[in-house]
Structure formats: structure tokens, C-alpha cells
Image: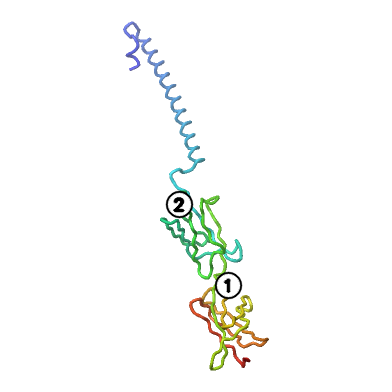
């Protein structure tokens, strides 16, 4: 094709040969330049991909859990639920104490993302709702011992089972203390999960009338009998 643009009828055979060599050299030079340009472009593209990273994947969220002992007290069980209204995602807590949610789009945070933790015997120290992605795509949540609210009543151990007022009720070795009202009723929150067996001690006018253990439950009223004679 290159020869078609050159008048060859007046050239000798040697001149045609030299002309062919020159055209081959020029074509080789153009190929080298194109190859170098292509290599530079490809290298630049690789650098851009490595720096920018994937652009088609939405960012995720990592929820890290630790217990009452602080960050070193890693929690390695349970589940984490992300509740964003129309979007609800659940992940299992792994051996590293983390629940991972992949490809969670930023739009999920528009109406708030509530983090609901379900771990046996533990509960979040404070409720957590995210209105924007956290820095670094991860958030740490501190858990405390799940507390059990208790409703109870203290009565005498006599046949009439009279309500007894002003009785000091001590749970779990005095970790939680309440006093009965005029109807012998009390309400208290014990920092132990339901189903745990803890000590209970009743003191009235300096006298101990009950010193035993009970199983915590928030489903029923706990009735305790104060042993011994109690004045009118």
C-alpha cells in the first residue's frame, strides 16, 4: 500500500529496493512508538485501579462487640441485627468478636440504622443508631451483664401472711438493695440475667428473717416469707 503512493516507473531495481527498506524502517519505528505508548497507558491504568480500588462495590459495616471487661473482653457469640426500616440484615458474631455486613449502601443510613445485639446474658450498655457510615467502616459496641427487673412482696410466715413494710431486701450479696412499702411490695433491678440463681437476704428491725437463694425471673412476682415473729 505504501508503494501505491510513490511513482515507481522511473526507478531502478536497486532504488526500489532501497525505498522498500526505508519504508520498512519507518513502519518499524511507528510500531515501536505505538507499543511504548500502549505500555505507558496500561501501566497508568493499573496504578489508578490500585489507588482507587473497586468502584462498583458498596461499602460494608463491621460491628465489634466486647463485654463488661473492656475492649480486651471480646464477645465471640450471638447475632447482630441491622434495622433500617425497610432493610433488615442479620449476621453472626465470629470468633474474632465481629459481625460483618458486606455491601451496605450509604442510602441505608438515611432513616437511621439501629444495631440490635442478641448475646446470651449480655445487652448493649447504650442503644446504638447510626445516621451515617462510621469512620473506617467499623463500630465497637460495649455490652454489660443483662439486668433482670424483679417485682416482689414480703409477707410474714404466719397463717394470715401479712404484708411486711420497711423490710430491707438485699440481692446478690448486697449488690442490689430495696425496701418494702406499706403493702410489703418492692421493685428492684438485679445486674444478672434471668435464670441466674442469686442470694437474697431480708432484714427487718435489725433481724434477719430470710437468708437463702432464688432464681431470677421478671415474669412473676417473687413472694418471700419473713421467718419468725413480727410485731403488729
Q: Which quarter shows the C terminus? A: bottom right
The residue labelled by disc 1 is: 191
66 relative to 153, above or below: above
Decide: few, some or many residues near mark 2? Use Cα within 10 Å; few <14, some 14-19, many ≥20.
many
Residue appearing at x 34%, y 13% in the figure: 5
Quarter residue 179 falls in: bottom right
Q: Secondary structure at mark 1?
A: loop
Residue appearing at x 44%, y 46% in the figure: 57
Quarter residue 22 falls in: top left
Between the C-alphas of marks 1 and 2, the distance is 34 Å
Does label 1 or label 2 sit earlier along the sequence?
Answer: 2
Residue appearing at x 45%, y 49% in the figure: 107
Q: Secondary structure at mark 2?
A: helix
Residue 153, image x, y percentages: 55, 83
Residue 178, image x, y percentages: 61, 78
Number of numbered discs visible in the structure rendering:
2
Residue 18, image x, y percentages: 39, 13
The residue labelled by disc 2 is: 108
Residue 141, image x, y percentages: 55, 60
User: Quick check: marks 1 and 2 in contact, CB under 8 Å?
Assistant: no
Amino acid at each position: 500500500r505504501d508503494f501505491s503512493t510513490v511513482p515507481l516507473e522511473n526507478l531502478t531495481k536497486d532504488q526500489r529496493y532501497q525505498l522498500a527498506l526505508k519504508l520498512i524502517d519507518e513502519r518499524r519505528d511507528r510500531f515501536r512508538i505505538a507499543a511504548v505508548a500502549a505500555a505507558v497507558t496500561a501501566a497508568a491504568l493499573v496504578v489508578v485501579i490500585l489507588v482507587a480500588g473497586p468502584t462498583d462495590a458498596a461499602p460494608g459495616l463491621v460491628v465489634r462487640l466486647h463485654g463488661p471487661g473492656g475492649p480486651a473482653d471480646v464477645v465471640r457469640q450471638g447475632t447482630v441485627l441491622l434495622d433500617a426500616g425497610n432493610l433488615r440484615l442479620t449476621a453472626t458474631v465470629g470468633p474474632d468478636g465481629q459481625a460483618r455486613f458486606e455491601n451496605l449502601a450509604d442510602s441505608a443510613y438515611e432513616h437511621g440504622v439501629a444495631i440490635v445485639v442478641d448475646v446470651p446474658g449480655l445487652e448493649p450498655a447504650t442503644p446504638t443508631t447510626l445516621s451515617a457510615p462510621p469512620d473506617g467502616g467499623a463500630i465497637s459496641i460495649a455490652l454489660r451483664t443483662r439486668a433482670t427487673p424483679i417485682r416482689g412482696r414480703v409477707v410474714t410466715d404466719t397463717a394470715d401472711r401479712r404484708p411486711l413494710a420497711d423490710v430491707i431486701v438485699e440481692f446478690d450479696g448486697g449488690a442490689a438493695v430495696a425496701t418494702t412499702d406499706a403493702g410489703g411490695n418492692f421493685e428492684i433491678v438485679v445486674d444478672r440475667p434471668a435464670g441466674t440463681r442469686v442470694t437474697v437476704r431480708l432484714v427487718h428491725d435489725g433481724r434477719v428473717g430470710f437468708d437463702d437463694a432464688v432464681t431470677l425471673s421478671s415474669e412473676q412476682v417473687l413472694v418471700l416469707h419473713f421467718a419468725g415473729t413480727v410485731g403488729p
